[in-house]
Image (cartoon, rainbow, N blue to C red):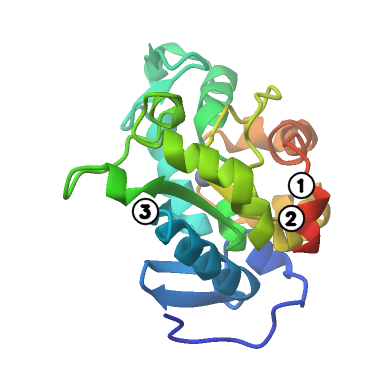
Amino acid sequence: MLRRVTSRPHIPLDALELTGRARTHLVELDDPRCALHAAAAGPFLAMRAAAAREGLLLEPASAFRDFERQCLIWNAKYRGERPLLDRAGRALEAAALTPAERVEAILCWSALPGASRHHWGSDLDVYDRAALPEGARPALLPAEYAPGGPFARLDAWLAAHAHEYGFYRPYMSDRGGVGFEPWHISYAPVADDCVARLDAGVLRDALGSAELEGAAEVRERLGELLVRHVAAVDPAPQAALDA
Ligand SMILES: [Zn+2]
């Protein structure tokens, strides 16, 4: 159900919206409760209705996330207040790592504030609520989406149908940046434009006034981080862009 609908679906995101520091590009949904880009909300609800006809309850574990929230996650991992994992999912001791090593480890599993696709409102992490016991939460692990896992049927359905609604999955292969995330879906017509607009200048401005741990290390590597962690995703299929 759309509670507030803006009429700006085709206007490109500005620098504040791109980096999660504004909500002007979003609509708030009541069911499921989440915030999405004005152009992505309708297609997402249509996709959810189609999945429901197959007995799949497409539920967002996370949709829009703002800069501030991403900063809290980043800083907590840097300080060792949240689990810090290496690429293989093994726990690391933050205090024993150099700033560069901490930044590298965080980036395996979390985006740099300002550079998360979740800022755009075009991207969501989804699971099948019908496949879990009442009240249970998904872990968002690859095994859940693999054959035999609770979300294997959702995985197959998304592979066959997401593009019909303009969605696709940008993290289906590990390209050295973000790891394999079969739960992360993206509304291609909006997200493709955002990737092209998010450059080092926009990101540097966003980080300028933030209280970010490891800021010096991040600033030094901004260009490389954009290439590895923003640009290095699976390309949107033409069918999703045309939907
Ligand atoms: Zn995600």
The residue that label 3 is drawn on is 55
The C terminus, quarter of image: bottom right
User: Sequence-wise, which precedes: disc 1 or disc 3?
Assistant: 3
Front residue of 74 and 45: 45
Q: Among all residues in the image, which is located at the extreme left? A: 134
Identify the residue under disc 1. 236
Q: Are marks 1 and 3 in contact (CB under 8 Å)?
A: no
Give the residue type at disc 2: Ala
Residue 114 in sight here: no
Compared to 36, does 61 lie above or below?
Answer: above
Q: Amino acid at mark 3?
A: Gly
Task: Describe the element under mark 2 as helix, strand or loop.
Answer: helix
**Location of residue 180 in the rendering, given as x and y in whole percent from the top left corner:** 57, 28
Residue at disc 1, secondary structure? loop
Residue at the disc numbered 2: 240
Residue 54 coordinates in the image, percent (x, y)? 43, 54
Cβ–Cβ under 8 Å for marks 1 and 2: yes
Q: Residue furthest front?
A: 54
Q: Nearer the viewer, residue 32 or 77?
A: 32
What residue do we see at 57% from left, 65% from top?
21
Residue 130 lies, in percent from the top left, at 29, 49
Q: Position of residue 5 (x, y in %)?
A: 54, 86
* Residue 171 visible from this viewpoint: yes
Mark 2 surroundings: few (<14), some (14-19) or many (≥20) residues within 10 A: some
